Image: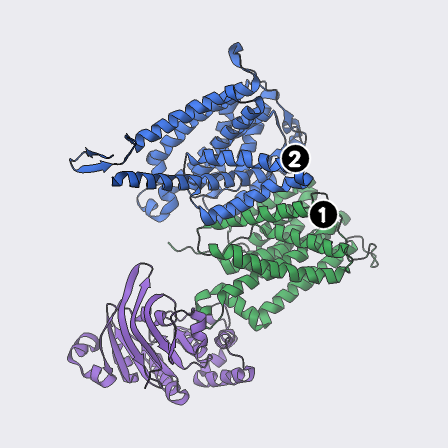
Chain colours: A purple, B blue, C green
């Protein structure tokens, strides 16, 4: 069974500096995969590599198709949505405009309008604020907006970079709950980068542990959670 | 072909030599040869050619000024033609209205431009890259209008400008006007270039280059950015002002329409083609901006009046092509060629 | 008072032209953070194209729209071929490229059309049917056209998906790519739109200042002044700035410095704004990262 997304010996570079040293990773269709690791391990870089935002070597295949030569906008149009660290909101545009941009690459106008309703269903607060300038939203609302915008693409794979960053625990809990719902209801596969390993392992089916640009452990979330060294180093007990 | 020499702390190093002479010596020989050639020109060339070469010397001085500011210090000026104009008008006004001897007007022009440049440099401190380019562009575009201003007509001569009599050789020397002016320009150029070179090689030079490349770091290390930037503006303007003064003497008149935006852009082309942040490069730039329009002019026979447009077009193409193909200018090409020769010599 | 009103309205009329140029400048600045020094020459060349079309017998308004289309396409080509390679080059390199473009376009016009000053037709009637002495029919017509163009541009950016995408690409190219926007083409389209807007300014100005290769020099300067005054990253501020500069120029020219020094007014505004309030009246304050 071929995975939805797989990388073979993926290396990534910022200019002359190498950050990823041959990462082999697979995301199964319909699954949630977590990417764990400390600061600087290369998690964000890995997501950026998947959407051609950095220079790469090695192979990336999505639904069997090679992504290496494609520009970011073309990777996205294949059905991969990326919620970057910092959220990447268009702060000077309204919430509604942000969402509309999420669907920019799609053609079916009526379906897009229906998706607005769907997305507002997940995040009712966005509907209340839809004419507001995105930059004036709270941190939690901006994160919701970022995820909502990604959903407007109708992606098959959703990449999330630190969705819990800077948010209050209750808000994070809501968001993660919605992520699980999206995964089951819409069959959107997720690849989630998280520093908060506990949260990530609760959500995910599979997990990869990254250290200084290499995968040091991988397996089901249960197995990783149960591992002694992981517990001590990343789960804090 | 190499010789091994010991460096100060005793380690052995190979000094590249070509035909038995070190690169440093080659450079000195080249300079001496150039000097001899330069002095010889007025005696071997016709009056008209001498006039042209005088203009080359003048442009070289102006380009050195602009290069100081834009090449070494990174402040983009699209308006140095204004300082050239100030220098030219200073000379004209001092000679014609105040009867000052022509040779004395040159340092005065330089001084006035030093002050003006410094004063312009003060508000320019707040402008970075693009915005400074914009402000100086505006300055250059408005210069002719300011010079035509009716209220100043008594001094500037209005649209007609001012005519200057060409000075004769002093002490009854057997030189005609063109030859003397050439030598006079050369005599002004040599100390100016010597000053410029020392400025650049010294502490000031290092400071202004540091400001261009790493302004924050420079500031943290105690370099007074405001002072050096304004100073560079002033010195740069002074050089160009001297060039303008000499230019006025050589052409024999100053008029507002001689100082259009075109002049400022010529100067920019000069330093870009010759080589930014290079002293030797300004000579190539000066040769380029003096002779290219003349050759393009000769095409007037083929194209009629429309040929007026050609030098302008050539400059445009050269600017873009330089940025694309040789961003370090002619001098950059020569240096890399020289480095290649030195490398192959060092390999033996 | 009559004189004042006359100068005021006349200023508004020329302000419309400056506003169009200011808008063109800001459109490109917003997307690329570069100032298109060649904007004036592009507008001038477009006007020459219109002139050739009209001279060939094509009715004015057909020629007008045809010129807009040609200017649009040419600008897209220029952006992709000449400007794009310097996208990440240092500022001086970009400035040199723009100046080079300015020189080439200017000399191309001089070469093809010569430097002889030509009259350019105005599509508006010679005599005012509305009885006012404050504005000539051309001035009124020109203001209407300018405002119509500005309104169309506004509507495009505000209400169309493409306009939204272009705004997004200008504000946040990285995020724009992440929603599938081809940012490179958005830049090129921005150039096209800017050129078309500039062409309108050129065609409206030419009946007054006459058609010759150097006609746009002063107007460009006023356009800069307007863009800076209003805020170089705020298109509608720039438009307002353009109108303000037009009025200021006329009033200052009449009452303060005399007609000869009008261009200096632009210089003073430019330097003044850059020194005292670089973000202009309505722009966002500039933050430079240390």
Residue C214 screen position, x and y as percent: 65, 45
Query: What number is the disc on residue B149?
Result: 2
Q: Quadrant of the C terminus of chain B?
A: top left
Q: Quadrant of the N terminus of chain B?
A: top left
Q: Determine whether, in the image, residue A139 is placed left or right of residue B15.
A: right
Disc 1 packing (10 Å; few <14; some 14–19; many ≥20)? some
Q: Is residue C104 above or below residue A90?
A: above
Using the rendered image of the protein, determine whether residue A213 is visible from the camera's viewpoint: yes
Q: Is residue A207 above or below residue C84?
A: below
Q: Mark 1 sits on what residue?
A: C209
Q: Secondary structure at mark 2?
A: loop
* Residue contact between numbered discs 1 and 2, judged by CB atoms under 8 Å: no
Residue C60 screen position, x and y as percent: 76, 59
Query: What number is the disc on residue C144?
Result: none
Residue B283 screen position, x and y as percent: 46, 33
Q: Are marks 1 and 2 on the same chain?
A: no
Q: Is residue B170 above or below residue A159?
A: above
Q: Determine whether, in the image, residue B90 is placed left or right of residue C215.
A: left
Who is closer to the viewer here, A234 or B296? B296
Using the rendered image of the protein, determine whether residue A237 is visible from the camera's viewpoint: no
């Amino acid at each position: 069974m071929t995975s939805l997304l797989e990388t073979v010996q993926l290396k990534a570079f910022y200019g002359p500096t190498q950050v990823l040293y041959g990462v082999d990773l697979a995301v199964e269709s319909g699954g949630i995969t977590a990417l764990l690791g400390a600061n600087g391990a290369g998690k964000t870089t890995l997501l950026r590599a998947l959407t051609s935002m950095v220079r790469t070597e090695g192979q990336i295949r999505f639904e069997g198709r090679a992504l290496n030569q494609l520009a970011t906008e073309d990777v996205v149009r294949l059905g991969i949505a990326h919620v970057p660290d910092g959220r990447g909101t268009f702060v000077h545009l309204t919430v509604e405009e942000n969402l509309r941009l999420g669907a920019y690459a799609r053609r079916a106008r009526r379906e897009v309008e229906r998706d607005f309703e769907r997305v507002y269903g997940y995040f009712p607060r966005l509907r209340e604020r839809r004419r507001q300038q995105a930059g004036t939203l709270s941190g939690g609302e901006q994160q919701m907006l970022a995820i909502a915008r990604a959903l407007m693409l109708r992606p098959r794979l959703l990449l999330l970079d630190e969705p819990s960053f800077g948010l209050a625990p209750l808000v994070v809990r809501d968001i993660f709950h919605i992520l699980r719902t999206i995964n089951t209801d819409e069959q959107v596969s997720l690849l989630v980068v998280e520093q908060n390993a506990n949260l990530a392992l609760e959500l995910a089916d599979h997990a990869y542990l990254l250290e200084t640009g290499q995968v040091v452990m991988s397996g089901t979330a249960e197995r990783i959670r149960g591992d002694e060294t992981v517990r001590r180093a990343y789960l804090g007990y | 072909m190499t010789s091994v020499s010991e460096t100060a702390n005793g380690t052995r190093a190979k000094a590249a030599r070509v035909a038995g002479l070190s690169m440093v010596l080659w450079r000195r020989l080249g300079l001496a040869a150039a000097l001899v050639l330069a002095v010889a020109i007025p005696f071997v060339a016709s009056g008209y050619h001498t006039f042209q070469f005088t203009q080359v010397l003048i442009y070289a001085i102006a380009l050195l000024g602009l290069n100081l500011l834009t090449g070494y210090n990174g402040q983009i000026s699209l308006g140095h033609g204004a300082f050239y104009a100030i220098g030219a008008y200073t000379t004209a006004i001092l000679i014609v209205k105040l009867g000052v001897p022509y040779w004395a007007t040159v340092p005065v022009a330089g001084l006035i431009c030093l002050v003006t440049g410094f004063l312009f440099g003060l508000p320019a401190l707040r402008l970075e890259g693009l915005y400074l380019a914009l402000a100086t562009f505006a300055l250059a575009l408005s210069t002719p209008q300011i010079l035509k201003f009716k209220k100043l007509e008594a001094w500037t001569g209005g649209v007609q400008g001012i005519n200057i009599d060409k000075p004769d050789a002093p002490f009854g020397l057997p030189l005609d006007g063109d030859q003397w002016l050439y030598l006079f320009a050369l005599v002004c150029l040599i100390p100016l270039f010597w000053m410029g070179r020392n400025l650049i090689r010294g502490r000031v030079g290092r400071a202004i280059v540091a400001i261009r490349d790493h302004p924050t770091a420079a500031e943290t290390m105690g370099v007074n950015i405001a002072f050096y930037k304004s100073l560079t503006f002033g010195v740069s303007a002074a050089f160009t002002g001297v060039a303008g003064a000499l230019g006025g003497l050589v052409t024999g008149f100053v008029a507002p329409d001689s100082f259009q935006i075109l002049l400022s852009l010529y100067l920019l082309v000069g330093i870009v083609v010759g080589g930014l942040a290079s002293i030797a490069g300004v000579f190539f730039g000066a040769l380029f901006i003096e002779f290219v329009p003349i050759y393009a002019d000769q095409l007037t026979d083929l194209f009629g009046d429309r040929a007026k447009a050609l030098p302008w077009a050539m400059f445009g193409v050269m600017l873009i092509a330089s940025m694309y193909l040789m961003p370090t200018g002619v001098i950059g090409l020569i240096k890399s060629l020289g480095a290649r020769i030195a490398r192959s010599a060092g390999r033996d | 008072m009559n004189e004042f009103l006359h100068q005021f309205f006349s200023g508004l009329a020329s302000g419309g032209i400056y506003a169009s140029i200011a808008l063109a400048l800001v459109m490109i600045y917003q997307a690329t953070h570069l100032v298109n020094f060649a904007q004036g020459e592009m507008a001038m060349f477009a006007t020459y194209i219109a002139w050739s079309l009209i001279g060939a017998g094509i009715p004015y308004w057909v020629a007008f729209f045809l010129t807009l289309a040609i200017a649009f396409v040419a600008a897209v080509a220029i952006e992709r071929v000449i400007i794009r390679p310097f996208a990440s080059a240092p500022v001086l390199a970009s400035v040199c490229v723009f100046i080079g473009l300015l020189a080439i376009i200017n000399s191309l016009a001089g070469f093809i059309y010569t430097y002889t000053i030509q009259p350019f037709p105005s599509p508006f009637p010679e005599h005012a049917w509305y009885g006012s002495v404050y504005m000539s029919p051309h001035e009124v017509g020109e203001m209407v056209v300018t405002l119509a163009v500005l309104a169309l541009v506004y509507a495009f950016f505000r209400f169309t998906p493409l306009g939204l995408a272009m705004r997004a690409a200008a504000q946040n190219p990285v995020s724009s790519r992440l929603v599938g926007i081809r940012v490179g083409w958005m830049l090129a389209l921005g150039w096209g739109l800017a050129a078309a807007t500039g062409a309108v300014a050129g065609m409206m100005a030419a009946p007054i200042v006459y058609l010759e290769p150097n006609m746009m020099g002063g107007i460009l300067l006023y356009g800069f002044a307007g863009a800076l005054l209003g805020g170089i990253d705020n298109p509608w501020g720039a438009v307002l700035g353009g109108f303000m500069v037009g009025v200021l120029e006329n009033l200052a020219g009449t009452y303060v410095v005399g007609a000869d020094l009008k261009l200096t007014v632009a210089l003073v505004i430019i330097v003044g704004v850059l020194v005292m309030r670089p973000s202009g009246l309505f722009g966002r304050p500039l933050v430079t990262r240390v």
